[in-house]
Image (cartoon, grey):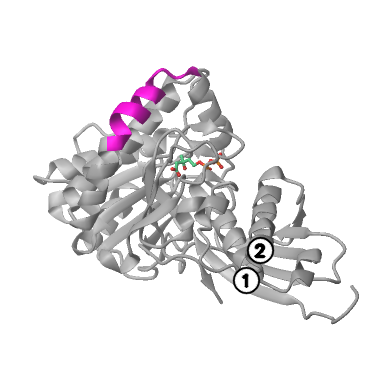
Amino acid sequence: MAGIELKDRSFTCTAPVNIAVIKYWGKRNEELILPINSSLSVTLHQNELRAKTMITLSSSFDEDQMWLNDKEEDISNPRIQRCLREIRRLATKTCSIDPSYLEGHVQIRSENNFPTAAGLASSAAGYACLVYCLSQVYGLKDVDISVIARQGSGSACRSVYGGFVSWEKGEREDGEDSIAEQVCPDMHWPDLQVLILVVSEQKKTVSSTSGMRTSVETSSLINFRANNVVPARMDEMKQAIKEKDFSTFATLTMKDSNQFHAVCLDSYPPIMYMNDASKYIVQLVTAYNLLYSSPRLAYTFDAGPNAVLFTPGGNIGEILGLVQHYLPPNPGAENYIRGVSAGQAVPPTPSKTTINGIGLLPWKPGSLQYIIHTRVGPGPMTI
Ligand code: DP6
């Protein structure tokens, strides 16, 4: 490059995983990743689950390159290319950095502190981190990066904020109004506890992208859900979160997970993400809640067999006792409970939670690999 030599620009950023309580399922535009319905998620704390990305922009690199968990990835992936193109377009338009940088290339190194593609929304955290870090490297300020993260992976747009986040589906054909918005920050409901029951670390059998394509093409329930159920449910869920109304939050979360999996089953060929262990967890949570006048525990399942449970803080000891009693690990398994209450003594199972004899499916010890105890957390950060 002629003229002044510019220094390399380097940033390291982290971004969180999110778990949807009103599910995104189905696109109206595959290329721009525009959904047929709005969705809402809880951002999980980065102490337990996060993506980390380091990006260097330099005029001395001959090409863009990317590594994921130390393995070089094909950067020609159209979703990554779209994110890079959009960031560079905005950097050019807003003159956010010295124009000479725009002729340079990037080296991107990403890693997750949890298994990739285990159904723990690694692509959401990964794309949110990529786009947030690129926006720092290219000096973009006051830009809604959720529109760009959405084009990497739909659910990634919700990981650009902490707390409770909605993704408004938008009406425009160019997708400029299909954006994420923070409903409430992470500190709004600090009492809410999250347990991730890792049933399987296997890669998913049907990816979300292809599963939702099959559903859009073949399910007759999916449009009913998008048009007649989700709009009201979004409003009720936002209200429940604002009021910290756990009972309504829990009921809507479980019903929405059930309906998403019903749409999957209504697709042809049918898509089954939940396995026997997942179904056992549904029965256990249902039986536990029936002991009380209103729900104390909620489950939700994404495109895989792992369960995510929510409960208010006051219940967490009882719930940890319950899951370890009814979902025991293989004898000798280590670090069964990870995260917030790792290493703490196993609480006894309170007598009220002795729910034997309610016809649970048989549980195979060891069906759960481990449990991650986490909380609601903040959005992406530069470190
Ligand atoms: C079941 O965001 O992974 O987790 O947009 O094709 O990348 P693409 O799909 P993705 O789908 C997530 C589906 C879900 C529900 C949700 O997170 O809302």
Q: Is residue 222 magenta?
A: yes
Rendering coords of residue 150 (x, y %) = 54, 48
Q: Is residue 332 left or right of residue 97?
A: left
Q: Mark 2 = which residue?
A: 91
Q: Mark 1 = which residue?
A: 139
Q: Is residue 348 visible?
A: no
Residues in magenta, as a range: 218-231
Q: Is residue 159 magenta?
A: no
Q: Amino acid at mark 1?
A: Gly
Nearer-the-camera pick, 214 or 320 = 214
Q: Report helix, strand or loop for mark 2.
A: helix
Q: Report helix, strand or loop for mark 1.
A: loop
Q: Is residue 35 visible?
A: yes
Rendering coords of residue 262 (x, y %) = 37, 26
| Mark 1 surroundings: few (<14), some (14-19) or many (≥20) residues within 10 A | some
Q: Main secondary structure of the magenta part?
A: helix
Q: Quadrant of the N terminus?
A: bottom right
Nearer-the-camera pick, 138 or 78 = 138
